[in-house]
Image: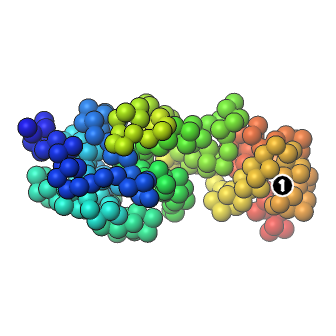
Amino acid sequence: MMAADGLPPLRDVIARHDLAAKKSLGQNFLLDLNLTGRIARAAGDLSQATIIEIGPGPGGLTRALLANGAKKVIAVERDERCLPALAEIAAHYPDRLQVIAGDAMSVPLTDYLIPGEPCRIVANLPYNIGTALLIGWLETMPWPPFFESLTLMFQREVAERIVATPEQQKDYGRLAVISNWRCETRILFDVSPSAFTPPPKVTSSVVQLVPRPHPEPCNMQTLSRVTAAAFGQRRKMLRQSLKGLTAHPLELLATVGIEPTLRAETVPVEGFVALAQAFDALRQD
């Protein structure tokens, strides 16, 4: 029996190609086509965009993106076992799916894009590299980046760290500062472990990040250093934790009007951006 898109059911594809998910690759295959369709629709109108997908596995989300009208999908897959299954999808959607066999951590994505054409990244990210991939995309230069949006699946706890504000002090940290400095972020919906094969032990969430066209000017490397120092000892006051950054933390804090007795988890994104700007300015004096 064929699925609604005219391709075999994903469970049949997995069985035929012997695609048992590998924990070492962070694989949890998403088989619910209603759910993959919901993720694809959450990414907006795909008809004029090239979609980059990381870790398609047997192609559940890939199929949903194409069925929902994606102009083109570029899928980066490290697991060579999955390539024959993806080739079947490519044959079903001629000239609309390009599969790149390689590690997403090292594949130069922009090499496969047509300059000036809209691009979005939509993916059920492998759990073991999801945060590293996100940080790499947030560090893209120049900014605004090559992508219009990121619609990504993470473990729920990672999703909460991405969108956190100082009001959610437990989750607020370096990832939230960098994410919300450069993007508008929100959690779209949760996904039950039962939607995956094999089911993970935790709930997942789909997060969307939309680049801010003009974030407050700041050196990314400096912001990373400031947040690393501040949150590296998050229970200490800034006057103490920032000693890992500068021998004169009180001078730095006074420059931007931040109380030295505050802790990192209470300082908003704009406060860290101001600290990074002031740190660079003081070094140049």
Q: Position of residue 60 (x, y in %)?
A: 26, 45
Q: Is residue 144 above or below residue 46?
A: below
**Residue highlighted by disc 1:** 242
Residue for point 60% across, 41% down: 161
Q: Position of residue 260 (x, y in %)?
A: 89, 44
> Quadrant location of residue 199?
top left
Quarter the N terminus occupies: top left
> Quadrant location of residue 33?
top left
Indicate the amino acid at tag 1.
Leu
Q: Position of residue 282 (x, y in %)?
A: 83, 63
| Foreground pick, 4 / 173 | 4
Q: Position of residue 264 (x, y in %)?
A: 77, 44
Q: Is residue 88 above or below residue 101?
A: above
Asked if residue 97 shows in the view, the reply is no
Number of callouts in the render?
1
Asked if residue 245 shows in the view, the reply is yes
Residue for point 48% across, 38% down: 201
Q: Is residue 46 left or right of residue 222?
A: left
Q: How is the image coloured?
A: rainbow
Dot 1: few (<14), some (14–19), or many (≥20) neighbours within 10 Å? many
Residue for point 30% across, 34% down: 35
Q: Is residue 225 above or below residue 3?
A: below
At numbered mark 1, what does the secondary structure look like: helix, strand or loop? helix
Quarter the C terminus occupies: bottom right
Q: Is residue 242 above or below residue 10?
A: below
Q: Is residue 202 left or right of residue 177?
A: left
Residue for point 91% across, 59% down: 248
Q: Is residue 95 left or right of residue 118?
A: left
